[in-house]
Image (cartoon, rainbow, N blue to C red):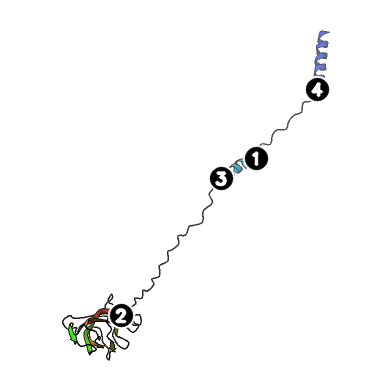
Amino acid sequence: MKTYASIFLLVITFLSSACAPALPVEPPPDVMAIRTSAAYTVVAEFTLTAAAFTRTPLPPTQTPTPETPTETPTIAFATDPTQIALGTPGVPCNDLSIDRATVDVTIVDGTQMTPGQEFVKTWRIKNTGTCAWGEGYGLIYLYGEKMNGQPIPLSIVVQPGEEVEVTVNLKAPEKIGNYISAWQMSAPNGVPFGVELNTKIIVQ
């Protein structure tokens, strides 16, 4: 009897186990899908890292080529802008020199005159400038007693280095005394140049 009872219990137990509801079984994960997702993640991380450290190349810096300065020609004007200076640079266009021993051709200083006496004063001078003296050059009154002075214009062209005699017609004052009359050479534009030329007389 016990044998049959044991068998019966085993059958009941087996049937009960077979009829019990089965637990849901989760499907196995898709290994390939997991690997693909992981690969995309790694690629994305590398892409972001590369973008963060990749420097945008700067445009090439061009060094401007300095321009060569243009030299402006310097024009040197002579003392007399109406003429072109010739000869050595630094020497004025118009200049003169005198020799104290020969400058007074007529009427040396201290010559005695009578009141109102007319006389001709001549000086010897040398052209030490770079411009020739011609028309428009002559003596002009500078200071002192003018004595009705009338300069005589140059009648020749005086080249640089040449000597010439210049003359002025004068008249002694009417009053007794010592007088001086100073004159100077002038360019055509009226600008005087060179040392002064003077005459000193005694009216008695």
Q: Earlier in the sequence, mark 4 or mark 2?
A: 4
The answer to the question of whether label 3 and label 1 lie on touching residues, with beta carbons closer than 8 A, is: no
Q: CA distance from mark 1 to mark 4?
A: 40 Å
Name the element at disc 3. helix
Q: How packed is label 1: few (under 14 Cα within 10 Å), some, or many (20 or more)?
A: few
In the rendered view of the protein, which quadrant contains the C terminus? Answer: bottom left
Name the element at disc 1. helix
Label 2 sits on what residue type? Pro
Q: How packed is label 4: few (under 14 Cα within 10 Å), some, or many (20 or more)?
A: few
Q: On screen, 72 above or below 30?
A: below
The answer to the question of whether label 2 and label 1 lie on touching residues, with beta carbons closer than 8 A, is: no
Q: Earlier in the sequence, mark 1 or mark 4?
A: 4
Q: On screen, 204 above or below 15?
A: below
Which residue lies under the disc numbered 2? Answer: 192
The answer to the question of whether label 3 and label 2 lie on touching residues, with beta carbons closer than 8 A, is: no
Residue ID at (56%, 43%) = 49
Q: Earlier in the sequence, mark 2 or mark 1?
A: 1
Q: CA distance from mark 2 to mark 1?
A: 107 Å
Which residue lies under the disc numbered 4? Answer: 18
Label 1 sits on what residue type? Ser
Which residue lies under the disc numbered 1? Answer: 37
Q: Position of residue 134 (x, y in %)?
A: 30, 88
Q: Earlier in the sequence, mark 3 or mark 2?
A: 3
Q: CA distance from mark 3 to mark 4?
A: 62 Å
Q: Position of residue 57 (x, y in %)?
A: 52, 53
Q: CA distance from mark 4 to mark 2?
A: 147 Å
